[in-house]
Image (spheres, rainbow, N blue to C red):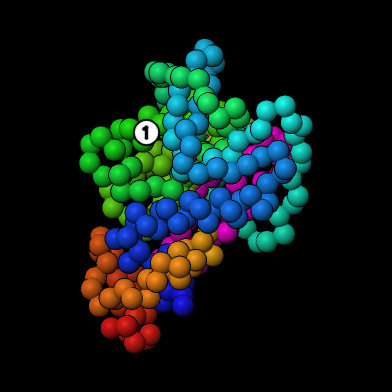
Amino acid sequence: MRSPFPGMDPYLERYWGDIHTRLMVYASNQLNAQLPDDLQARVEESAGVEIEDRRTRTVYPDVRVVQEPDESWAVGETATVAVAEPYVVLLEDEPRTQRHLEIIDTTDGGRVVTAIEVLSPANKVGLDGPVAYRRKQRDYLEARVNLVEIELVRGGECVLAIPEDRIPLACRTPYRICVRRAATPERAEIYAVPLRLPLPNIRIPLRPSDEDVVLRLQPLIDDCYRDGRYQRIDYRAEPVPRFGDEDAAWLDQLLREKGLR
């Protein structure tokens, strides 16, 4: 059974621990089916990132793509599914982050190519969480690791790798995605994720010699909803946080039309 919502189901946010875990597994499976043979998506392993001074710092991405050592680089196949087009924001006048890294050697034997972060309330709420996340975010960017941030929870502050005032108005939607490519550090790609539309297919950058692969987000959320048996959700309550007037009215009408209110 599918969620009554065409895209992200806001009622899943209250069960984010379970949803987040399922997303990590499903996303890594989807990516591994597309990656070149010498790349592998792994879940919840420490990732050592190397900075110019040759020290390393261990950070923990949600999903990462690593290059196996002593393997040739292979060019990926062109994706055949339609992908959403991001807004591209120039960041060349963004202040440089001061380097302040404490780095240890990695133990996985592979160079990190891409990190995918599915943001959780722990990254966005309180004092320590956002500070710790921004430190990890800085480490990725300084190490020239591609960074993909998927924001499907609304509570807390904006911690995406772009100044909030640089986010285009068209992308100030309840949910958002930010992609920072190591090859173009002066740019950020922002995907709008409205409540009323299906989640987009997004391009995941790899090495300069590889074509992007595509992460199809809507099937992942659909699988989480089905496999987690979330059809038992009581949709009569209001989602937390509450939406603005227009989205709240649309949500109420949708649920009434489906007999859930």
| Neighbours of disc 1 within 10 Å: few (<14), some (14-19), many (20+) | some
Q: Nearer the viewer, residue 161 or 140?
A: 140
Residue 190 belongs to magenta span: yes
Residue 214 shown left or right of residue 64 in the figure: right
Q: Is residue 194 visible?
A: yes
Residue 248 belongs to magenta span: no
Q: Nearer the viewer, residue 25 or 217?
A: 25
Placement of the C terminus among the 4 image quadrants: bottom left
Image x and y of residue 246, in percent: 32, 70
Q: Label 1 amino acid?
A: Arg
Tell me which corner region of the image, top left, top right, bottom left or bottom right, holds residue 88. top right
Residue placed under numbered mark 1 in the picture? 134
Residue 211 shown left or right of residue 197 in the figure: right
Q: Is residue 166 visible?
A: no
In the image, residue 108 above or below residue 237: above
- Which residue, as the protein is rendered here, is positioned at the far top? 53
Q: At numbered mark 1, what does the secondary structure look like: helix, strand or loop?
A: helix
Image x and y of residue 113, in percent: 60, 34
Image x and y of residue 223, in percent: 49, 66
The residue shown at (49%, 68%) is 222
Q: Nearer the viewer, residue 103 or 162?
A: 103
The residue shown at (28%, 52%) is 155
Image x and y of residue 179, in percent: 52, 43
In magenta, the rendered stretch is 188-216
The residue shown at (71%, 55%) is 79
The residue shown at (54%, 14%) is 54
In the image, residue 110 above or below residue 82: above
Residue 16 shown left or right of residue 43 in the figure: left
